[in-house]
Image (spheres, rainbow, N blue to C red):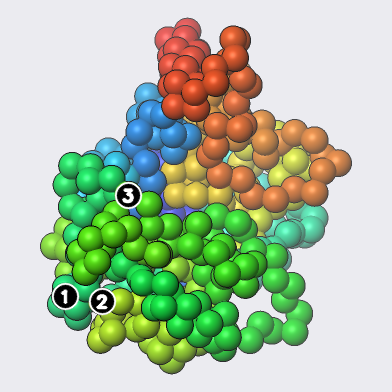
Amino acid sequence: MTVGVIGAGLAGVEAAHALSKRGFCVKLHEMKPQKLTPAHSYRGFAELVCSNSLKSDNLTSAAGLLKAEMRLLGSLVLEVAELTKVSAGGALAVDREAFSDEITKRLKADPNIEIITGEVTGFPLENTIIATGPLTSGAFAYAIKQKCGGFLNFYDAAAPIVTHESVNFNKAFFGNRYGKDGADYLNCPFTEEEYETFYKELINAETVPLRVFENLTVYEGCMPVEILAKRGRDSVRFGCMKPVGFTDPRTDKRPYALVQLRPENSKRTLFNIVGFQTNLKFGEQERVFRLIPGLEKAEFMRYGVMHRNTFLDSPRVLNRYFMLKGSKNIYFAGQITGTEGYAESAAGGIIAGISLARALSGKEPPELPETSIIGALSRYISDDESRDFQPMGANMGLLPPPGAPIKNKQERYAALSARALTDLKAILFSH
């Protein structure tokens, strides 16, 4: 039997892979390279836009637990991420191009998957997973809107990337917070005077004007740094510029503030300014971000950008298996459903793929335990139609509390992770 997947981002490639593994022939539709979204530029599938990091791999974090669950479900994205990863401390970060190239190569070589290039403009009738992402093209977005009703919009922002060779190492230094093993991050420490100058310029810098019909509703996880800074003088100093765990080599004291940069590729020639998603004009980015100690002569390989993201009012139109209510096996997956984040998007693709495969095989969809991050997210996007729905990423707050109260946060998170994986394994082994 042939099924359709529309979109070859993280969710789409996971959905196509899950269906292929279960013996289905897949027509995978992708409009690149014929047409690109405002945020995409690379030719390959599963292009990472905002960051090259899939976040923490530690099981005492929600991001780490989510990835452990995805590995149990046979994630293609995480398998390839392991092959193309770059050093990033406890995070799983990848070489963007190598990651995309390997996923593209694998799907093109899969005999069960047919790649169809070109924009889809009409809504499918049945047996299809829609994974077109938060930047769904205008014509197809209109088709979805006609079928599903209204959309909600928010804004996502990407951070600038600079070259390694342009960094001033008389001020910047490599190291991990609290001296942990490795030296994955490039650190730029501030004195109080340097911070005062930088902060004043940041909050007064000129941003790209929004179009008149656009309302600015920013997802907290991708808050532009200039908007965060305007919340108060110390808002960024206790956020993306927190100095704890470091000593400034110039003073032998803890810096007043600190900016970190993370390697973008395996050769460590490019570095992403961590937490500095921005909507500043390009000239303003050069002027203001070169006030960061060590980046006085920074060479910008990519400026930060801000773009509109579109997502479904999912609780009103989707069930917890990501299927469109009342449809003939039409599923959605990825950020268009309101699961915010790389791994979260990929996880939605896996679940949609498994759910469609089981439905077409005459089986019930998987009842994911609410104690798992994947199960909790699937319930978040489908429960409580009355609420003002907003995107959500993986977090431990989505999970039911442990049976007995545990005061220590790390111990509590470890207990939640152990329970989640035990419960998910029980479900998987029963099928």
- Assess disc 1: are there few (<14), some (14-19) or many (≥20) residues with their C-alpha within 10 Å of its C-alpha: few
Residue linked to disc 1: 170
Q: CA distance from mark 3 to mark 1?
A: 20 Å
Give the percent coordinates (x, y) of residue 229: 57, 70
Q: Secondary structure at mark 2?
A: loop
Q: Secondary structure at mark 1?
A: loop
Give the percent coordinates (x, y) of residue 212: 75, 84
Give the percent coordinates (x, y) of residue 154: 66, 63
Q: CA distance from mark 3 to mark 2?
A: 19 Å
Residue depicted at 28% across the width and 84% down the height: 296
Residue linked to disc 2: 294
Tell me, yes or no, whether the two marked residues, 2 and 1, touch with CB atoms within 8 Å: yes
Q: Is residue 196 above or below residue 5?
A: below
Specify the label residue 350 is tagged with. none
Give the percent coordinates (x, y) of residue 191: 36, 72
- Assess disc 2: are there few (<14), some (14-19) or many (≥20) residues with their C-alpha within 10 Å of its C-alpha: many
Residue linked to disc 3: 245
Q: Nearer the viewer, mark 3 or mark 2?
A: 3
Q: Is residue 149 left or right of residue 226?
A: right
- Assess disc 3: are there few (<14), some (14-19) or many (≥20) residues with their C-alpha within 10 Å of its C-alpha: few
Q: Quadrant of residue 68?
A: top left
Mark nearer the N terminus (3 vs 2): 3
Given residues 64 and 172, the one toward you in this image is: 172
Residue depicted at 31% across the width and 67% down the height: 189
Q: Is residue 18 above or below residue 164?
A: above
Mark nearer the N terminus (3 vs 1): 1
> Does the rendering let one see residue 38?
no
